[in-house]
Image (cartoon, grey):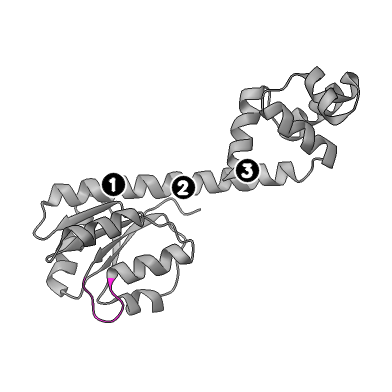
């Protein structure tokens, strides 16, 4: 995963694109600008952490339409909307679909910088969680069907005796499977196992 954040700016006003580029550069954040959503979609993809700054009203596919498309494609990169024509329904639609912020032009530079910082932090956290979830899934794939059943019961808070009764096996066998689960999932406590199970369930 590349560590250096990259912000995509999409606005059909060149002056705004330049102003935002200069603003982000002033705090050491790299950006790439596009005049339309089509230009953005046609650009070479990048896996660097960051966010999108989108104008709502754009030629062709609007910012809100692009957001809907990204959601359908399960692209979770955070979005900050900006508009000179904001209204309540537009804001509600954007926020319900997961937008990080909705800034009305002209906005304060600090408001934009705060929004970008929060969006980048969110994207990096999501990426770290995705990596962790992939690792947990690989560990869970090493469990036998019975060990998977025992893990599910342990995560629910059942004691060994209860698990034995539930699965129709001896308590000693439960302990054996439980030990295998803890070893294969690389955890030292039930609390750690629960956290990993929660990642698997997402």
Is disc 1 surrounded by few (<14), some (14 to 19) or many (20+) residues within 10 Å?
some
Q: In the rendering, at what x and y percent does residue 95 appear?
A: 29, 54
Q: Position of residue 157 (x, y in %)?
A: 67, 23
- Count of numbered marks: 3
The Cα atoms of the two marked residues, 3 and 2, are separated by: 14 Å
Disc nearest the viewer among 1 and 3: 3
Residue topped by disc 3: 200
Q: Secondary structure at mark 3?
A: helix
Q: Residue at x 67, y 46 (%)?
A: 137
On residue 117, the disc is: 1
Q: Quadrant of residue 99?
A: bottom left
- Which mark is first along the chain, 3 or 1? 1
Q: Residue furthest left?
A: 106
Q: Secondary structure at mark 2?
A: helix
- 145 vs 48, left or right, is right
| Front residue (pair 16, 18) | 16
Q: Is residue 69 above or below residue 119?
A: below
The residue at the point 41 percent across, 54 percent down is 49
Q: Is residue 63 visible?
A: yes
Between residue 113 and residue 64, name the one nearer to us: 64
Q: Which residues are magenta?
A: 57-62
Residue labelled with disc 2? 126
Q: Quadrant of residue 174?
A: top right
């Amino acid at each position: 995963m590349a560590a250096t954040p990259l912000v995509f700016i999409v606005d059909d006003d060149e002056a705004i694109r330049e102003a935002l580029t200069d603003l982000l550069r002033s705090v050491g954040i790299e950006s790439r600008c596009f005049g339309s959503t089509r230009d953005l979609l046609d650009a070479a993809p990048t896996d660097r952490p960051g966010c999108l700054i989108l104008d709502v009203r754009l030629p062709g596919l609007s910012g809100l339409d692009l957001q809907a498309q990204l959601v359908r494609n399960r692209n979770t990169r955070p979005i900050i909307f900006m508009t000179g024509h904001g209204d309540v329904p537009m804001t509600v639609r954007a926020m319900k679909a997961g937008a990080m912020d909705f800034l009305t032009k002209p906005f304060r530079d600090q408001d934009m910088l705060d929004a970008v910082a929060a969006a980048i932090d969110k994207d990096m956290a999501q990426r770290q969680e995705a990596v962790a979830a992939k690792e947990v899934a690989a560990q869970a794939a090493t469990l036998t069907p019975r060990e998977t059943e025992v893990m599910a019961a342990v995560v629910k808070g059942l004691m060994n005796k209860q698990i034995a009764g539930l699965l129709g096996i001896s308590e000693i066998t439960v302990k054996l499977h439980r030990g295998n689960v803890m070893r294969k999932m690389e955890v030292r406590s039930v609390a750690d196992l629960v956290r990993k199970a929660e990642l698997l369930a997402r």
